[in-house]
Amino acid sequence: MTDPAAGLSIRRIGPEDGATLNALAETDNLFDEDPAVAPSVALTPDGARDFLADPTVLFWLAQVEDLTVGFLHCCVQRRRTHGPWAELLLMEMGTHAGYRRQGIGRALIAAMEDWMRANGVRDVWVPADTSAVGFYRKCGFATDEGEILVKELH
Ligand SMILES: CC(C)(COP(=O)(O)OP(=O)(O)OC[C@H]1O[C@@H](n2cnc3c(N)ncnc32)[C@H](O)[C@@H]1OP(=O)(O)O)[C@@H](O)C(=O)NCCC(=O)NCCS
């Protein structure tokens, strides 16, 4: 296994990286808290390009050489009131199960924060899995009032 400290790169991917996004989908169970779950179903090539071309989508990959070892996906949400023009919703992130606790998650959060500073965005929200709360706290997140609810239509 490669030492991520040597040669870790974080890059934001764009519409030309659809194949990389779809390759990640095929093994994204390895980035889940429970790697026994089934991997996701990838988008079509056009769907992946359109997803990454969407200006409200921010997607970073952590790579060691050509190997993807982590990812972070945020959604840009415009605000309707005075103040910063938008805030971020951190939709999903994961570090490959074989590379955890080596600073990759923190490096992905730092890349997101660099984007926030460069783009005048101050707040980022995350609906966190319970098992990941300790990680987010280490990265400076705090608990807000209220609860995050979800409804799925059947
Ligand atoms: C949560 C996750 C992304 C963290 O990634 P990581 O690359 O292991 O994180 P880092 O190595 O950068 O850790 C940064 C700090 O958080 C700590 N940390 C990491 N995971 C933690 C956890 N689950 N609980 C408490 N602390 C944690 C690390 O020890 C480190 O602390 P330190 O800087 O004081 O040494 C990773 O465990 C993961 O992919 N989990 C499964 C998917 C998941 O839960 N994603 C989040 C969904 S909301």
Image: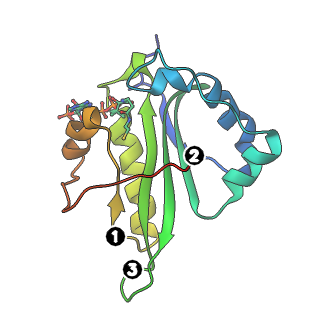
Q: Is residue 142 above or below residue 122?
A: above
Image coordinates of residue 69 in percent, x first then y, are 49, 27
| Residue 4 position by quadrant | top left
At horizontal 53% and vertical 45% (from top left) the residue drawn is: 60
Which residue is disc 1 drawn over?
A: 122
Q: Amino acid at mark 1?
A: Arg
- Local crowd size for mark 1, using a 10 Å CA cut-off: few (<14), some (14–19), many (≥20): some
Which residue is disc 3 drawn over?
A: 84
| Residue 142 position by quadrant | bottom left
Real-space Cα separation, disc 2 to disc 3, in angstroms:
36 Å
Q: Secondary structure at mark 3?
A: loop
Between 151 and 117, the residue placed more toward the observer is: 151
Q: Describe residue 57's horizontal placement relative to residue 139 as left or right.
A: right
Q: Amino acid at mark 2?
A: His
Do we see residue 128 in this rendering? yes
Which residue is disc 2 drawn over?
A: 154
Q: Amino acid at mark 3?
A: Pro
Q: Describe residue 56's horizontal placement relative to residue 125 as left or right.
A: right
Query: Of marks 2 and 3, which one's residue comes earlier in the chain?
Result: 3
Q: Secondary structure at mark 1?
A: loop
Real-space Cα separation, disc 1 to disc 2, in angstroms:
36 Å
Mark nearest the camera among 1 and 2 is 2
Contact between labelled residues 1 and 3, with CB atoms less than 8 Å apart: yes
- Local crowd size for mark 2, using a 10 Å CA cut-off: few (<14), some (14–19), many (≥20): few
